[in-house]
Image (tube, rainbow, N blue to C red):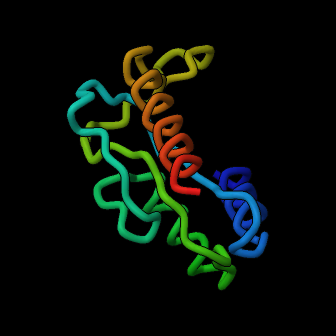
């Protein structure tokens, strides 16, 4: 999460006339593609990664310099910590990451068409 927070801070540090930034929030363990949606980062609801990032920004008193859209899912599932130490746990299924990626691509295309 530390790297994601740094990426967000760096990507939003450009002036509003600079490059656009879109982000994906947590896809781990999600199963239902109908729960995937888009919202401005501070308005994302039901996503543990977005909540953790917002808490980190508040704790560190370091905030993104501009707003950005996020693809996320509000599907709440229990995190399953791995029993086997070699198991990475909390992975995701290909159809969910594909939908997240297509939605991000759609945001980029829509933004490019607007300009």
Question: Residue 39 versus residue 112: which sits nearer the camera?
Answer: 112
Q: Position of residue 109 (x, y in %)?
A: 53, 40
Above or below, 77 against 12 in this view is above
Q: Position of residue 59 (x, y in %)?
A: 60, 80
Q: Residue at x 62, y 75 (%)?
A: 66
Q: Nearer the viewer, residue 51 or 33?
A: 33
Q: State the quadrant of the C terminus.
A: bottom right
Residue at point 46% right, 25% down?
A: 97
Is residue 84 left or right of 99 when viewed as pictured? right
Residue at position x 33%, y 30% in the image:
30
Compare residues 5 and 90 and report the one nearer the observer. 5
User: Which quadrant would residue 94 be assigned to in this image?
Assistant: top left
Whole-percent x, y for residue 46 in the image:
29, 55
Q: Is residue 106 left or right of residue 46?
A: right
Against 42, is 35 above or below?
A: above
Which residue is outermost to the bottom? 61
Q: Where does residue 112 sit, x and y in percent of width and height?
A: 59, 48
């Amino acid at each position: 999460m530390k790297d994601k927070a740094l990426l967000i801070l760096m990507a939003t540090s450009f002036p509003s006339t600079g490059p656009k930034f879109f982000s994906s929030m947590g896809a781990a363990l999600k199963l239902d593609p109908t729960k995937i949606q888009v919202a401005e980062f501070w308005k994302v609801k039901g996503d543990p990664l977005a909540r953790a990032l917002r808490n980190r920004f508040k704790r560190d008193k370091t905030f993104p310099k501009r707003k950005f859209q996020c693809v996320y899912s509000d599907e709440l599932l229990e995190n399953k910590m791995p029993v086997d130490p070699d198991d990475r746990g909390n992975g995701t299924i290909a159809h969910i990451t594909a939908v997240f990626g297509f939605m991000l691509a759609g945001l980029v295309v829509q933004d490019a068409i607007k300009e």
